[in-house]
Image (cartoon, rainbow, N blue to C red):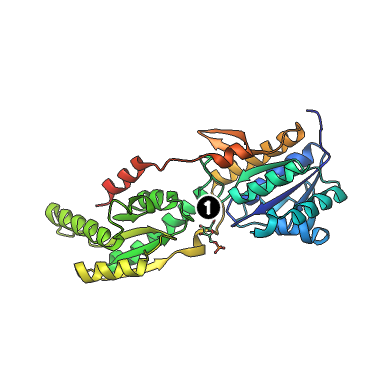
Amino acid sequence: MEKKINAIAILTSGGDAPGMNSAVYAAAKTACAKGLKVYGVRYSYWGLTNDIDNCLIEFNVNNIGDILNQGGSYLRSMRFKEFYKEEHLQKAIANCRDKGIDGLVVIGGDGSFRGARDLTLRGLPCIGIPGTIDNDIPSSDYTLGYDTCLNTIKTLCASLCDTISSNDRCMVVEIMGNQCSDLTVNGGIATGATAIVVPEIMESINNDAAGYVVEKIRKARELREAQGTSSGDIKKFYLVLVAEKMPGVNVADIASAVEKKLGIESRSIVLGHLQRGGTPSSFDVIMGCRMGNKAVKLLMDGISNRVVVRKGSDIVDYDILEALDMKTPFDYDLLEIANELGV
Ligand code: F6P
């Protein structure tokens, strides 16, 4: 392979996600193996722009060792909202030129890819890798961190079910996703939730999330009582998953409606940032490695302004601008499965 660049930098941007470190590790190791200089940039675009001297770590095959399977972001991840401003972009470009960096790998979400496109347009070749628990990057079937996060939701909800099954209670759980319903829908299937509430159903339920959940649980209870069991031990607990950031919807109100209307003692919980931590799943580690490896090979081939994404079981790359314009239709079939199983 012809070497078209000499030194690359790698950064993580936006909310941290399990698997980001795996991608950093793979990009760094690939570049080391090909004889490039490799830097990690601490504190994302902010570090690249405002404090390059303190934020650059030079990686080699010895000191990159331990982060492959680490959760969070070793390099630190943050949102630098001002990064679209010309003065910041020019400063970042000048800093990279000064340090001899001629390629950048950016691991983050769509906002981070916009920064990568802006830098490429100004002369620094960049490649993006989708890293966020939300799975909300339309160009990719999958984002680093999503699989681990789903597993975490499953584990945390199993703990909740231990306690609610002991008290015949209902638990209403708020799930992250930043306006993308994937974690809630697939989390609902993985946990056997009785009801899930996501933005895509709101119109069809007249924006009455609490009323919808009450009816769903009422029907489930009727079915359970009608079918009975030989021991007479009917399942009496209910798990409900609700997507975060839905205007006018909150888990405490839903729990209180279930208690009032159905007489089922109810509690609510926001899982919050517990969902974002943890050791990456093998799937996230392997995807991070495949994406990190490919990103560096593209840069070495003189290719830039691309995002490395998963399509089906392949790792492919798209132009960043095209990728940013893509839309993913909501999967109503999956929602139907979640609903059919929620009894
Ligand atoms: O994008 C990842 C994410 O965890 C979202 O699911 C959530 O809405 C948001 O970040 C939380 O952001 P912060 O950590 O800044 O509170």
Please name whichever residue, 116 or 194, is drawn nearer the observer in this view of the structure: 116
Q: Left or right: where does residue 31 sit relative to residue 316?
A: right
Q: Quadrant of residue 316?
A: top right
Q: Position of residue 102 (x, y in %)?
A: 81, 42
| Rendering coords of residue 221 (x, y %) | 19, 58
Residue 28 visible in the picture: no
Front residue of 177 and 117:
117
Q: Position of residue 141 (x, y in %)?
A: 51, 39
Q: Is residue 207 left or right of residue 41?
A: left
- Give the vertical position of 323 relative to 132 (above or below): above
Residue depicted at 46% across the width and 54% down the height: 179
The answer to whether one can see residue 53 in this image is yes
Check mark 1 vs ligand 1: CB closer than 8 Å? yes or no: yes
User: As displayed, is residue 173 above or below residue 186?
Assistant: below
Name the residue located 82 percent from the left edge and 40 percent from the top edge: 36
Q: Residue furthest top?
A: 1
Q: In the drawing, does residue 194 fall left or right of residue 30? A: left
Inspect the image, locate mark 1, and give the three-letter code of the amino acid beneath it: Ile
Residue lying furthest front in this view? Answer: 86
Q: Quadrant of the N terminus?
A: top right
State the SS at label 1.
Answer: loop
Q: Which residue is mark 1?
A: 133
